[in-house]
Amino acid sequence: MPLPQVCVCYLVRERAGVTEVLLGRKKHGLGVGNFVGMGGKLEPGETATDAAVREVFEESGVVVDASALEARGLLSYHFPHHEAWSQESSVFVCRDWDGEPGPSDELDPEWFALSSIPFDEMWDDARMWLPQVLAGASVRRIFVFGEDLATVVSERSPVA
Ligand SMILES: CNc1ncnc2c1ncn2[C@@H]1O[C@H](COP(=O)(O)OP(=O)(O)OP(=O)(O)O)[C@@H](O)[C@H]1O
């Protein structure tokens, strides 16, 4: 069975020579309380890019053009102890948008210097790939979560 498809998008800016990323504490649903990038489920017929454009707008009010989204790979999350949470996330970075991010029902956006990303308050996997993505890399990783539904217990290799 293919995993449900979701997307995540990290807005990145430079301020006084410091690179910052926009995160927000999730107010509802899967991962509530964690700092996350903006994103969510693909709607029927949407591409991951379409969904990222829509989710960034819904969650922060910022308008991004699909051509400004940098595709940075695919992450699979397996929850053998709670299959309904298993999903696959397309990852995007965006450096060019219109508007100022503001609060929404989903999250209150905050800028973090790349040296101060709150990994202890994020999904456990984020520390294992987000620094690479924000440094310009693309990723393909498959994470398996344990019985606590919070800890990465193993990683699978993607079949080439
Ligand atoms: C398990 N380890 C994980 N590590 C890092 N990020 C994770 C994640 N698991 C899910 N995500 C992110 O969470 C969003 C989907 O969450 P999900 O609850 O399905 O969607 P959300 O309620 O926001 O979506 P709708 O707005 O209803 O579409 C999506 O960005 C996805 O990349």
Image (cartoon, rainbow, N blue to C red):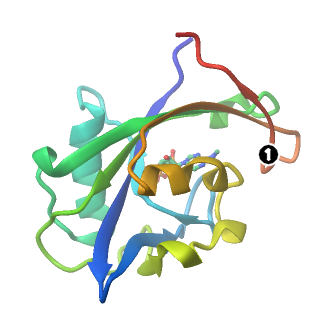
Residue 87 lies in what quarter of the image? Answer: top right
Seen at 39% across and 75% down, the residue is 20
Question: In this rendering, would 47 be left or right of 108?
Answer: left
Along the horizontal axis of the image, is 88 left or right of 83? left
Residue that label 1 marks = 149
- Work out which quarter of the rendered image holds the N terminus and state it: top right
Circle count: 1
Residue found at x 37% / y 74%: 19
Disc 1 is placed on an element classified as loop
- Give the side of residue 92 with respect to residue 3, left or right: left
Q: Position of residue 39 (x, y in %)?
A: 40, 52
Q: Image point 54% across, 67% down: which residue?
A: 26
Using a 10 Å C-alpha cutoff, classify the residue at mark 1 as few (fewer than 14 neighbours), some (14 to 19) or many (20 or more): some
Along the horizontal axis of the image, is 151 left or right of 116?
right
Residue placed most toward the observer, 53 or 143: 143
Q: Where is residue 45 drawn, in percent x and y?
A: 23, 26
Task: Return the residue nearer the eye: 94 or 62.
Answer: 94
The residue at the point 26 percent across, 45 percent down is: 70
Spot occupied by residue 24 in the image (x, y as percentages of width and height):
48, 72
Q: Quadrant of residue 118?
A: bottom right
Where is 3 relative to 94, above or below? above
Q: Position of residue 153 (x, y in %)?
A: 84, 38
Of 85 and 128, the residue lying toward us? 128
